[in-house]
Amino acid sequence: MFGYIHANRQEMSEPDQKTYKTYYCGLCQALKRAAGMKGQILLNYDVTFLCILLSSLYEIENKEEVFGCKVHPLSKKCGYISPVIDYGAAMNILLGYHNLMDDYLDNGNRKKKSLADSLRKSYDKIAKQYPRQSSAIEEFMQKTRAAEARHEENIDVLSGYTGEMLSQIFLWKEDEWKEELMNIGFYLGKFIYLMDAYEDREEDDRHGRFNPLILKYRECQACYEAFMEQSLTSLVEQAARSFERLPILENASILRNVLYSGIWDRYEYIKIKSGRKKKEGTGKER
């Protein structure tokens, strides 16, 4: 479910790359403080985007921390410390725990179950601190599993569950920016669901696993790619529209890089990897 909301670093200025990396490393350290080294395994760029978005909107003052990194032992790293970074780490753990449990329930992966169990104490503590967000994630998991069990064909309904959940994660404070932040989370959540289903469709089809896009592909192979591109583009446009209504000046170039460029990297990679771009170019379909 993770890994789709990230930056296109090739199109970033050096200062923006440094800032982006400092947020990322700061989130990594916050995960370590919240759950130890096992928490750092959950680190992802999706939550990094959330940290930058909230920090920039609320003009949070970041403190810089220099530390040693076991992954990069030859040089010191720098990360930000702030209430928003801590919030991001908390949400990362809530989401990561359920993601691990979902993998276990789907595939019987006991390593994922073991890691989830090791995070349970931290998860319970965070769930008590953020009951609204934790309840939203638990409700999302229940609704999604029930929908998959009944082989729900309505993609809008399925992606909407992810959107509803992520809208609660993006809502840090109940204030004047509530609607726009929830909209960004909602539409990015739907985008993440569709991208995940898009990436997994062929493998899910081979293994007989549920994926709503399998039926969509079989119904009209010739229009499938156009449908996906139009659907994903519409969702990103909705998220970007709400973003542009927020009074964000600091790090705006980083956030726009993610929304207008980086978010499409994985989509283009999947198309190239699967040979879909060639098929589109020749007009041939399977």
Image (tube, helix red, strand yellow):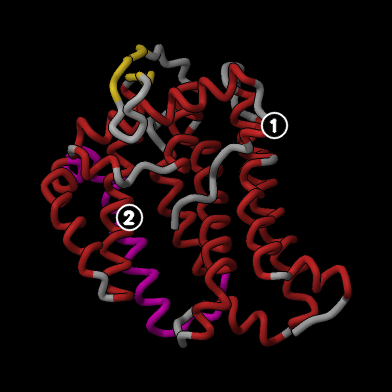
Asked whether residue 156 appears in the rendered view, the answer is no
Seen as rendered, the residue at the extreme left is 121
Determine whether, in the image, residue 70 is placed left or right of residue 198: left
Horizontal relation, residue 277 to residue 23: left or right: right
Does the magenta-highlighted stretch encompass residue 144? yes
Going from N to C along the chain, the mark reached first, 1 or 2, is 1
Q: Which residue is drawn at 14% across and 57% down?
A: 117
Picture layout, residue 231 above or below residue 286: above
- How crowded is the residue under tag 2: few (<14 C-alpha within 10 Å), some, or many (20+)? many
Would you say residue 256 is visible in this rendering?
A: yes
Helix, strand or loop at mark 2: helix
Q: Kindly identify the residue that appears in the image at 33 percent across and 64 percent down.
A: 141
Q: Which amino acid does label 2 sit on?
A: Ile
Image quadrant where residue 73 sits: top left
**Please, what is the three-letter code of the amino acid marked with disc 1?**
Glu
Q: What element does badge 1 sit on?
A: helix
Residue 109 x, y percent position in the rendering: 26, 70
User: For the magenta stretch, what is the residue range?
Assistant: 126-155
Q: In this view, does 9 lie to the left or right of 182?
A: right
Residue at left 84%, top 80%? 284
Of 269 and 161, nearer the camera is: 269
Q: Mark 2 points at which residue?
A: 137
Circle 1 Cα neighbour tier, 10 Å, few/some/many (<14 / 14–19 / ≥20): few
> Which disc is residue 272 wearing?
none
Q: In front here: 201 or 276?
A: 276
From what the image shows, is residue 67 above or below residue 175?
A: above
Q: Name the residue under label 1.
A: 11
Residue 56 in the figure: left or right of residue 44: right
